[in-house]
Amino acid sequence: MGRALELARRGEGRTRPNPPVGAVVVRDGAIVGEGFHPRAGEPHAEVFALREAGEAARGADLYVTLEPCCHHGRTGPCTEAVLAAGIARVFVGVLDPNPKVSGGGVAILRSAGVAVEAPVLETECRRLIAPFAKHITTGAPYVILKSAMTLDGRIASGAGDSRWISSEASRAHVHRLRDTVDAIMVGIGTVLQDDPRLTTRLPEGGRDADRIVVDARLQIPEDAALLDLHSSAATVIATTSHAPAEKIERLRRRGVQVLEFPIAKAGGVDLCALMQRLGALGYQSVLLEGGARLNGAALREGIVDRVQIFIAPLLLGGDDGPSLAAGTGMPTIAEAKRLKDVRVTRFGDDTLIEGDF
């Protein structure tokens, strides 16, 4: 199952509206076939693994990170392929959260005499499909808040300098993360301060995620770097009725997708409404790389699902630099948001702490 997870991760960020899935066929203790789902419309992981195994699949074991599907979509049911191949046992990482499947695939296999064991490495497999699971059950994308901070909790100096708090190894990891999400979201403050490109820069290239800017008054400069990229990724701006109509039209003529929302109580974009709209557009995962104001609003409005914080061995001192999240926080420690499934990883001298709500 560990190998199946490795394979599945090759499809992260490329399979929507489907989840990333990996599969391995094992006979007499040796792998005889393996595969992963590369993108929607192409065969599922099980089909690739069974094709590679060929006749060796008959009487063999199949390890798959997600319950085999049992419904007709753009491809046929994987349960039919498993039965036709003569697989004797199936080990399933996690049951499919899709209501069209939801245990149905396992039931079909068992009724046909195939032994099924589930779940296997459930935590890891569930973490892999978390964006798909949230989107299929709530209609909203899975949001990962990523930030880097100093030991004294600052994400920038008092003068706004933040390049670079994190190490080169940490930044390389962030680009690998960008390669696996559907969209990257920032606030207008980040655009005005840093003029980011929000592209994925890896030695092997990688893919650019779509870019989302939360900009209640449509202050984005029309020569901003992310508006002038030669990339297949889309640019989306979330704004409100405060935005000048003529500027909206100019941006739309340039191919920018401008979404208008009612003004939230705090005066900005209603982030819950934005998430529902993004979900309706098909986004399963959003990487939030905002500044303190957007981070604070996202946490208060409860749209964040996972947090990834890089802590660098730096001290800025003073109290003039921005912290992770601006605005009013929880009044007591007892009310603080506590992370679950916490993981700690070292990248150079930095420490990454990540966990889920």
Image: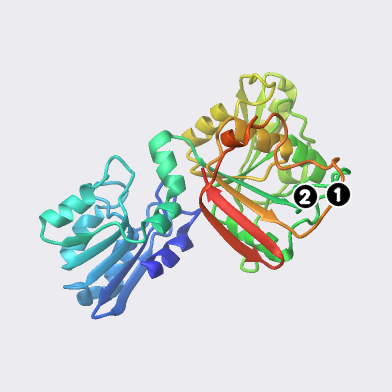
Judge by depth and name the residue closer to the eye, 344 or 60.
Answer: 344
Do we see residue 284 in this rendering? yes
Residue at the disc numbered 2: 152
Per the image, the residue denoted by label 1 is 317
State the image coordinates of residue 261 (x, y, percent, origin top left). 61, 23
Q: Which colour scheme is used?
A: rainbow
Distance of mark 1 from mark 2, alpha carbons?
7 Å
Q: Quadrant of the N terminus?
A: bottom left
Q: Which type of secondary structure does the marked residue at label 1 adopt?
A: loop
Which residue type carries mark 2? Asp
The number of numbered badges drawn on the structure is 2
Horizontal placement of 205 versus 140: left or right? right
Q: Is residue 194 above or below residue 276?
A: below
Q: Residue 97 placed where, x, y %?
A: 34, 44
Residue 173 image point, x, y percent: 63, 61
Cβ atoms under marks 1 and 2 closer than 8 Å: yes
User: At label 1, which amino acid type do we have?
Assistant: Gly
- Residue 218 lies in what quarter of the image? top right
For residue 187, above or below residue 83: above
Tell me if residue 232 can be seen: no
What number is the disc on residue 60? none
In this view, 63 is above or below 150: below
Residue at (61%, 68%) from the top-left corner?
Answer: 204
**Nearest the eye: 221 or 20:** 20
Relative horizontal placement of residue 230, taking residue 91 as reference (left or right) = right
Which circle's residue, 1 or 2, is located before the other in the chain?
A: 2
User: Measured from the top left, where is residue 82 in percent x and y?
Assistant: 21, 62
Q: Which of 53 and 152 is in front in this view?
A: 152
Q: Residues within 10 Å of mark 1 (few under 14, many from 20)?
A: some
Q: Which residue is drawn at 62% across and 24% down?
A: 260
Q: What element carries label 2?
A: loop
